[in-house]
């Protein structure tokens, strides 16, 4: 059997301004890890970094799925720890990629605080980068610290993002996230934005129930149920079982799951053809000089860590068949 296909399940609670989603990144997440592990310079991510990046990708997928925006959602955390920066990017078609930079020993029990936010000045940024921009248009970006109002550092990605959504987007959010070498998964429960409330997509939803104590109680009840989900359960149980266990007393309206090309999938813009074009742009003299010095031309994608190597024969073919280069992608080697 092959690797299961990644999936996204969305649902709403009937009669309540509360929405939810569950994401399970399987093949997409494993491709992120495979490319990193295959990189001869870096090797695989240490386990704590793997967990953190997987949770970020699951969360970014959940957030992207809830906005109507023709562009990429980029979730970034940065600080001065052994992981100075980690990035998760999800496009409007749910194509995703992610990367983390490591600058020093990673503690085996590292968390968000000890990996990124050692000096307490770490930040979380979410950027919406439009696919096409109007003249002068800037991407939307919100930035919050990796600590609460009392300067207590967040140790989990879920805590960080719940804080972000409340501070920057005025959206009450409950997140449960988990990741291992096979699966990155997440459950999101969110109170729908009211009239005039800011949100990632720049939209507002007219709502007459602001301040309605019954609605507030309903959201708190649902969020409490969601937060009772253990990370191990999120990684081992199927979606139907999770929803049945958590919300068996609630009236759920579920939507058709998004899978395959319609669902979350790995997508990086690098390819062997693009590298071939870059070599062509260097010119044959420069390419020959690099080959003479190093024996081959090696290019590494800074985002997904895929390595592309061209020996003298490969490079000669680039210049011989330059007119035949066509857009596309291929498996790196």
Image (cartoon, rainbow, N blue to C red):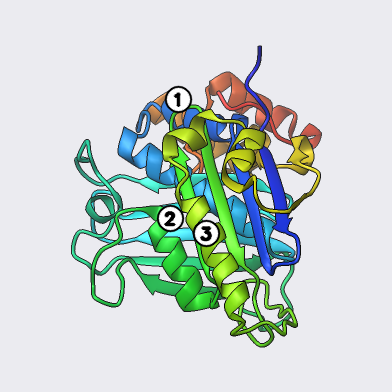
Q: Quadrant of the C terminus?
A: top right
Q: Position of residue 125 (x, y in %)?
A: 45, 67
Q: Quadrant of residue 230?
A: top left
Q: Is residue 192 visible?
A: yes
Whichever of labels 3 and 2 marks the residue nearer the N terminus, that label is 2
Task: Identify residue for label 3.
Answer: 223
Nearer the camera: disc 1 or disc 3: 3
Residue 303, placed above or below residue 43: below
Residue at horizontal 68%, vertical 78%?
A: 202
Secondary structure under the numbered disc 2 in the rendered image: helix
- In the picture, the disc for residue 38 is 1
Query: How busy is the neighbourhood of tag 2: few (under 14 within 10 Å), some, or many (20 plus)?
Result: many
Left or right, residue 243 beside residue 99? right
Mark with earlier residue (1, 3): 1
Relative depth, front residue between 207 and 217: 217
Find out whether the residues at labels 1 and 2 contact each other: C-beta distance under 8 Å: no
> Answer yes or no: do the residues labelled 1 and 3 have beta carbons within 8 Å?
no
Badge 1 element:
helix
Q: Position of residue 158 (x, y in %)?
A: 43, 55
Residue designated by label 2? 158
198 with respect to 233 (left or right) = right
Report the Cα–Cα distance between label 1 and label 3: 40 Å
53 left or right of 2 in image: left
Quadrant of the rendered image containing residue 80: bottom left
Q: CA distance from mark 1 to mark 2?
A: 29 Å
Which residue is located at x 67 percent, y 30 percent?
A: 318
> How busy is the neighbourhood of tag 1: few (under 14 within 10 Å), some, or many (20 plus)?
some
Q: CA distance from mark 3 to mark 2?
A: 13 Å
Q: Residues within 10 Å of mark 3 (few under 14, many from 20)?
A: many
Residue 154 percent coordinates (x, y): 30, 60
CB atoms of marks 3 and 2 within 8 Å: no
């Amino acid at each position: 059997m092959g690797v299961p296909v990644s999936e996204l399940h969305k649902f709403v609670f009937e009669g309540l301004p509360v929405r939810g989603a569950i994401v399970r990144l399987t093949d997409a997440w494993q491709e992120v890890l495979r490319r990193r592990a295959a990189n001869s310079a870096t090797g695989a991510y240490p386990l704590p970094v793997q967990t953190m990046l997987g949770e970020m990708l699951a969360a970014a997928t959940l957030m992207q799925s809830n906005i109507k925006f023709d562009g990429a959602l980029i979730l970034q955390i940065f600080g001065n720890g052994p992981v100075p920066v980690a990035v998760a990017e999800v496009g409007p078609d749910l194509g995703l990629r992610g990367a983390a930079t490591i600058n020093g020993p990673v503690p085996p029990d590292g968390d968000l605080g000890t990996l990124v936010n050692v000096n307490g000045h770490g930040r979380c940024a979410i950027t919406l980068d439009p696919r096409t921009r109007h003249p002068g248009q800037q991407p939307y970006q919100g930035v919050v610290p990796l600590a609460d109002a009392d300067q207590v550092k967040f140790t989990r990605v879920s805590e960080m993002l719940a804080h972000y959504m409340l501070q920057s987007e005025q959206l009450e959010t409950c997140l449960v996230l988990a990741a291992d070498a096979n699966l990155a998964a997440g459950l999101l429960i969110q109170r729908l934005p009211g009239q005039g409330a800011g949100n990632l997509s720049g939209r507002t939803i007219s709502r007459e129930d602001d301040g309605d104590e019954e609605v507030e109680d309903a959201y708190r009840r649902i969020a409490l149920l969601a937060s009772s989900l253990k990370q191990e359960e999120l990684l081992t149980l199927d979606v139907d079982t999770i929803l049945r266990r958590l919300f068996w007393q609630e009236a759920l309206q579920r939507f058709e799951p998004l899978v395959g090309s319609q669902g979350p999938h790995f997508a990086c813009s690098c390819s062997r053809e693009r590298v071939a074009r870059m070599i062509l742009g260097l010119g044959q003299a420069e390419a020959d000089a690099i080959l003479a010095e190093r024996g081959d031309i090696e290019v590494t994608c800074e985002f997904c860590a895929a390595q592309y190597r061209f020996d003298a024969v490969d490079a000669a073919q680039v210049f011989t068949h330059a007119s035949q280069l066509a857009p596309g992608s291929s498996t790196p080697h």
